[in-house]
Amino acid sequence: MDHTSILRKYGLFDAKVPRYTSYPPANRFVQGIGAQHQRGWLAQVEPDEAVSVYVHIPFCRRLCWFCACRTQGTKTLSPVAAYIEVLLKEIEAYRAALPKGIKMRRLHLGGGTPTLLSATLMHQLLGCIFAHFNQTDDFEFSVEIDPTEAKTDVLEVLAAHKMTRASVGVQDFAPQVQAAIGREQSFEQTRDVTQMLRKNGVQSLNVDVLYGLPFQTEQSIIKTLDRIVSLRPDRLALYGYAHVPHVSKRQVMIPDEALPDPQKRFLLTNLAKEQLTALGYVPLGIDHFALPQDSLTVAARAGMMVRNFQGYTDDPCQILIGIGASAISKFSGGYVQNAVSTSAYAARVRTHGLAGHKGIALTQEDTFVAALINGIMCNGVIDKKAMALDFPDFTDLLMHQIEHLKKRFADLVIDMPDRLVVRAEFHAATRLIAADLDQSRALEHQHSLAV
């Protein structure tokens, strides 16, 4: 059998599984894990700990139909200004609950559209963050940028606060695809913004591309990638479009019949991977690419790359502070997600200071399974020796899982004395293997296609 036939035999083209940006996945968070747990876990952070901070800006001037993120449209800045006031209160509450010695190693502004803020609002937000969190010597600051919503004065404020990395969304430059997903964005707009970012001292550029979009063809995705690579981004993320109109109502605007079937999606992603590899980018994990000298590539070679809510990262922090509506925090004891709607979020901050709404407390077995899945998702490997050293109480379970995977995925994995390896030609099945390690996974309909 050829590779496609083997992958079909294992159900790649039918399975719907989590993307495993966390373990357990966020759809398994439960009510009752909230602000009280946040405070307890914050109090346990070591005084010399370095943390990551994520700030969610859920507003967009236009709502792209393909997007399943927690966002809301706005025509004016009035609700945005009111939201920033609440963010400032939450930042103060977080800082009061954390030990005095902690420092911020990473800061990421996501959305939504962070660059929707006016220069004044952006200055106010960043001023508060930097006033409450001292930075480490290796501090990095990244922002998601919409090239159609990136005013010069806002970019100058970001530059003045030492933004080091920008993440630019593209999706596909083909006009028919853009019309079908409600996202008009020319190459010229994208090029001009990336040039402006570099002129303002941004050291690193990420670009996000989607495959599996309506009316997308082999020619359109290759042409899009050629244009993107002409901008020489340091990293690219090649995400599969998740069509989940039962979760994201705006996706009903996208005609089902225009979407490629799973086998066509597989063809599109393989074409993209071949194109990017030929152009000098190193494939990392299941959907990222980076230049050979990029820090993410270096981390991957050293086995230090991890997967989190922003995708793959070289961020070494064990603590993630999520600020804003729907933002998720990660602690050693578990995850907490803030209230999702901006009104519920604001009410919780005003009442409790913190906005935890649901989450999950991690068991030792959760941590063990998370390490297995991270190894598979990041490196395509389960390191037997490292796992046995890190989890001595789970040696029997580790051996059981290894034996199970050898039988369940006999064509896809290679068992070595010190490690179990996913064969390079079958990396497309990585999420399937991760899901098999996750014995208590939730219902299929809540997840995206594996390919």
Image: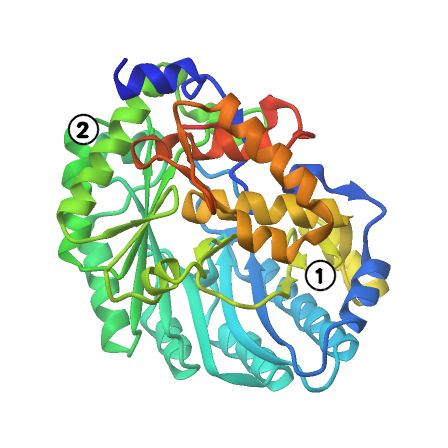
Q: Which residue occupies 66% across, 29% down?
A: 439
- Relative to 273, say whether 216 is above or below: above
Please identify the quadrant where the C terminus is shown: top left
Query: Which one is closest to the eye, mark 1 or mark 2?
Result: 1
- Relative to 142, say whether 95 is above or below: below
> Which mark identifies residue 218?
2
Q: Tell me which corner region of the image, top left, top right, bottom left or bottom right, holds residue 23.
A: top right
Residue 381 visible from this viewpoint: yes
Q: Which residue occupies 36% across, 43% down?
A: 287
| Residue where numbered disc 1 is placed | 332
Chain-order first, disc 1 or disc 2: 2
Q: Residues within 10 Å of mark 2 (few under 14, many from 20)?
A: some
- Labels 1 & 2 near each other (Cβ < 8 A): no
Q: For mark 1, give the secondary structure.
A: loop
Residue type, mark 1 in image: Ser
Q: CA distance from mark 1 to mark 2?
A: 43 Å
Q: Relative to 434, is 421 on the left or the right?
A: left
x, y (%) of residue 371? 59, 49
Q: Relative to 320, is 346 on the left or the right?
A: right
Please identify the quadrant where the N terminus is shown: top left
Q: Relative to 110, is 184 on the left or the right?
A: left
